[in-house]
Amino acid sequence: MIHSIIKRDGRVVLYDQNKIASAILRAMEASGEGNAADAARVANAVQSALQGRFRETPPNIEDIQDQVEKQLMNHGFNSAAKSYILYRANRTRAREANTSLMKTIDEITNIDARISDMKRDNANIDGNTAMGSMLQIGSAGAKAYNEMYLLRPEHARAYREGDIHIHDFDFYSLTTTCCQIDILKLFHGGFSTGHGYLREPKSIQSYAALAAIAIQSNQNDQHGGQSIPNFDYGMAEGVAKTYRKAFARTLANAVEDFLDQEDLAERVREVVSQAEDASGEHPRLENQAAFDPAMTESLCRNLSLKEADAARLIARARRRAAKITQADTYQAMEGFVHNLNTMHSRAGAQTPFSSINYGTDTSPEGRMVIRNILLALDAGLGHGETCIFPIHIFKVKEGVNYNDTDPNYDLFRLSCKVSARRLFPNYVFLDAPYNLQYYVPGRPETEVATMGCRTRVMGNVYDPTRQIAYSRGNLSFTSINLPRLAMEAQGDEGLFYEKLDGMLNLVAQQLLDRFEIQAGKHVYNFPFLMGQNVWLDADKLTVQDDLREVLKHSTLSIGFISLAETLTAVYGAHHGQDPAIQEKGLAMISHMRKFCDRISQEHKMNFTLLATPAEGLAGRFIRMDQQRYGKVPGITDREYYTNSFHIPVWFPISAYDKIRLEAPYHALCNAGHISYVELDGDTAKNVEAFEAVVRWMHDAGVGYGSINHPVDRDPVCGYVGVIGDVCPRCGRREGERIPQERLEELKKRYPEMPAFQGIQ
Amino acid sequence: MTMKQTNEKLGQGVGFERIRRITGYLVGTMDKWNDAKRAEERDRVKHGLK
């Protein structure tokens, strides 16, 4: 007789045949065969078998489960046996996941991030801080749950084994990726952060401060980056308001001085507002045909001034107001950059991931914004440090800023100078045909903008009347491990494409599965993104509505990594080595794009192809593939896979050829793309050379590009530039001390040198 | 953490900051990068303008 059994944790408990019978019944119900009586019969058989085998010691759980499987099959309940086996495997996986989760949390809790690669997976989270660790623990828990309960088994396997990577998997059940915030729409009429209501801003300082708060608030509703597509157009309105106020003030001062009277401010404001009514214009930075005469007339009539005196006072007021506005705008831009590098999101674990796009607003106010944000970027932070955020994106457009006769060409030149020193801005090229097709002059929402590292949202299959950048974003993206498919196909092109099609279908289904979870969310889950109508058509929803329809404005993206190694695996060389292989590469990526276009039409949703930013993925995939295939030369023999469609970073090639070869892939990867060129420090300092590279990108049809060059800084003397072994300014080597007198001497030669306070 | 340094030991133990771009982002200094990213940065070759 069986009296007791041994549980997994070693405890001995009383044997209970009913438990076995009900487990069997559940398996029978799941497979649709057998009833309670059958279950009892099989449970009896299990007991008899156990009695035969376990006379001395009690059986353990695994022994019993083995017998249940066996007896189900012996009694002809094959389907029930199968579902019991599946159930058992799932339980085993859940237990293993629990164990591995605890191990992960143990590592997060106890290991220094400098030693733990896992804790440095995302370089923007400091895994050594309390809040950073809490975020990582939450992330680990969410991932374990999502894999166990939300993914189909085939998706879970593909994810676990590294066939695909589901990005931001910790947020799988919770939110969407990113958004292009139309900052003007948000500001008009004011908005609420969820913690307090903010009135519509009235000066450039408050425009800039609130723009940072908007980014921060939205960052807490989504897992990806936040972007402002219309930073120049948006902030220009704040500049105009500042100028208008400054003009009234400086005019009052000028009039008071001229008449030798005090307390005329109120009276002059009244006089200005009469001129505004008469001309239908506010005072603005540029010369105004209607306002200035009306202002002169109003001054003469109200304050008995002579016309010549009035005109002179207005001119003086204008000069002073312009100066004040310029100074305020610079301070506002400086404050904005400082805010985005210091303010916290996600319980203090990160600064917000932020991007701003600008360059095409040709109004005097817009131009003032662009110039000053570039100057603030150039100045750096408090000790001259290079700003990490926001990502600056300069929009290049012929007729606006590309040719030397264009109104914003001077600002494009300035951007090159700044980028040559600070790595930002990056460049978006609106003249590339796939961007130009959306462009409508005078409608900035039709200008392509980027978010974070490269994401682009423009076309709209769901609503072709709304092919705009504003108020949209990406919902989710999953990347395919391309070189693995190539290695599995053992160089057979046909087999590779067969496997690729299988993987594309699998990823599309997984993205749709996740969409179902996202579509079921409500306005109240996203108090800022939806509640404040940041998202397109959110204003048509009530707080209880689900998000299915409005989310269809955004994109579901299929990404890929490592075209270069894939081509090497299938054809023996990569696209930088052979023009024929470049054709093969383009065919491969076109194939993926066509798949995306086809399912977009099928579902009337925006499936797009992404040149994946492989943050942690480059290492994750290759480590798994090295275990499977070893170190295959040219494919798995490094510590990382090559990013997206890039020519490998280690491959010697000229800047021109790299741009020429990568540009056609930009046209295909409509979810986002970026190309880099690496310049040495001296070349980067040459603004002509820098600009020439940007122009090559433009002319070659690149969509988004940037130029990398070394930016080093010595925190002791504040030198920014290329530092080899020895700092060119103070002459010290890394870690060496420097005499106080030497530093003071340098301070005389470089007055902008910050006072050294110690290391951060 | 900011350590005030005494005048006699200015700069002692203080390294140079090296900021690089990876996957579109500038990421602080490289000490927070994961191993794969560090390796990628190390392998980069410069592109000539010819």
Image: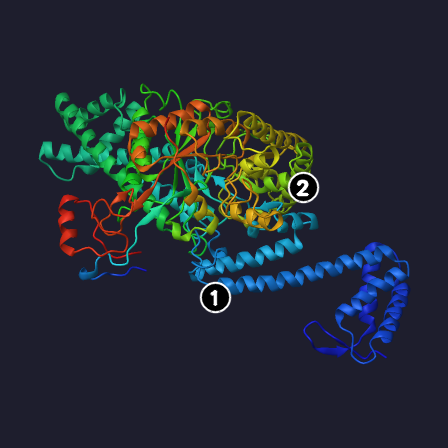
What's the distance in space between the residues labelled 2 and 1, CA to CA?
38 Å
Determine the residue positioned at 25% across, 51% down: A733
User: Does residue A431 appear in the picture of this structure?
Assistant: no
Q: Give whichever of A625, A42 is nearer the camera.
A: A625
Circle 2 SS class: helix
Decide: marks 2, 1 in contact (CB < 8 A)?
no
Q: Is residue A539 left or right of residue A411?
A: right
The chain that hosts pointer 1 is A
Circle 1 SS class: helix
**What residue would you read off at disc 2?**
A506
**What residue would you read off at disc 1?**
A110
Give the x, y percent position of residue A548: 62, 41
User: Does residue A244 appear in the picture of this structure?
Assistant: yes
Q: Closer to the N terminus: mark 2 or mark 1?
A: 1
Q: Is residue A707 left or right of residue B36?
A: left
Quadrant location, the N terminus of chain A: bottom right
Give the x, y percent position of residue A126: 42, 56
Label 2 amino acid? Leu
Determine the residue positioned at 32% across, 28% down: A689
Give the x, y percent position of residue A106: 52, 65
- How many residues crowd mark 2 within 10 Å: few (<14), some (14–19), many (20+)? some
Give the x, y percent position of residue A332: 30, 41
Q: Give whichever of A154, A49 is nearer the camera.
A: A49
Numbered tag placed on residue A611 in the rendering: none
Q: Is residue A628 left or right of residue A309?
A: right
Q: Indicate the quadrant where residue A375 lies.
A: top left
